[in-house]
Amino acid sequence: MASPLLRRHKPPSRLHELVKAPENHPASIERRESWDASRPATVYTTPEILPDGTPCTAATVILRTRGCTWWWKSGCTFCGYFNDVRDDVSSDDLFAQWEEAKRRTKNFEGCDMVKVYTSGTFFEDKENPVEWQEAILRETHERGLHLVVEAQAHLCKDEKLAWMASIHPGLTVAIGLEAYDDAVLRFHVNKGFNLKTWNSAVERLRFHGFRIKTYLLFKPPFMSEGDALGHSIRWIKGVSPLSDEVSINPMNIQKRTIVDRLHRSREYRPPWLWSLVEMIRESHQTISSGDSRVIVHPTAGGKIRGAHNCGSCDKDVVAAIERYSVSSDLDEFSNINCSCKSIWHDEIRSDCALPVQFGTGLSRRGKLQRLLRAP
Ligand code: SF4
Ligand SMILES: [Zn+2]
């Protein structure tokens, strides 16, 4: 008998429908459609740094949109943004969400930067109405707010970029590259574009005078901890000279994604915090000597679904990583230690010595005896 997840009124006609079974399950759709389309998903403010290096406050506005066109066709293996979107969002809804974001931040009081995140590509007309894109570009420019928007590389087309530059010159376009490696992009991330496309997008963005922010993903699925560490050090070296800012996002498991399913079936463990510390140590020279800013932000750090260690040292290690992002001083890590570091170290050594694709480490933290007894 088919599992309840796959049981449906008519049999799936495409493999894609089976892969996306949890995302397209009636309960997921019902949850998505229960959101109020006139209210943004999240609005918050954080300390940030302006392009000229001045510290400032940035407002982040995450909107409920129709979502990423790539996700509806196929989608990245780790991306849970679809949880926040609904396919009937109208132009009026988006304007209402923008007004609500302003209300919640007292009209961006004290902010010099606004990050407008649309769970996809800000300037893709199928995702967001053109009149709304234009209104946001114009308003932020007129108010002197530095704007950050997100995009997929293959959608950075000359005509669209020229149009944006005519309304809001010099804004930042953030691209989720995730991996500086074509095989990883294709087989681990299912990114939908390759490095050649990303390189041309970077050239075009520069030509139109935009700033470039690049996201890298630490430990995509189907990869061992040891490989993730080695790759990320190489990727930082590769993308830093081509970006104004590099943000390394250690995997955090978003609900109902492919990575979520791997994690539940004990075939994926989010990265160790020690791996992030090692990556920072090994990349410190690149980070401190280059022109681009490199930030590591462990979302859900210390939690089971985010980058974590043994449970007792997590808080201190996350705090040291956060401090390093501000100070760029390796001394932040000099006084932190824990007995779990040797377990992590053995795992990295075995991963690099043995041909085990998913790695040699345990899928969960906790006492070895308890994990072995668990079903
Ligand atoms: S391109 Fe971005 S929004 Fe679209 S599926 Fe991939 S990560 Fe998600
Ligand atoms: Zn520990």
Image (cartoon, rainbow, N blue to C red):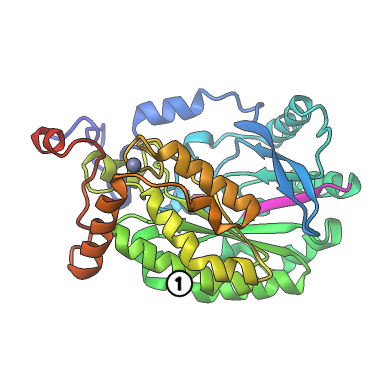
Side of 235 relative to 18 (left or right)? right
Q: Position of residue 333 (x, y in %)?
A: 49, 52
Q: Quadrant of the N terminus?
A: top left
**For the magenta stretch, what is the residue range?**
144-150
Closer to the camera, 279 or 45? 279
Side of 254 relative to 343 (left or right)? right
Residue under the image location 43 percent in, 25 percent down: 30
Q: Is residue 118 magenta?
A: no
Q: Position of residue 150 (x, y in %)?
A: 63, 53
| Residue located beneath label 1 in the image | 234
Closer to the camera, 84 or 73? 84
Look at the numbered disc 1 and give the secondary structure of its residue.
helix
Judge whether residue 178 can be spotted in this image: no
Residue under the image location 77 percent in, 53 percent down: 50
Side of 270 relative to 125 (left or right)? left
Q: Is residue 148 magenta?
A: yes
The amino acid type of the residue labelled 1 equals: Arg
Q: Main secondary structure of the magenta part?
A: strand
Q: Position of residue 145 (x, y in %)?
A: 83, 47
Q: Position of residue 226 (x, y in %)?
A: 31, 62
* Beta carbon of the mark 1 residue lies under 8 A of ligand 1: no
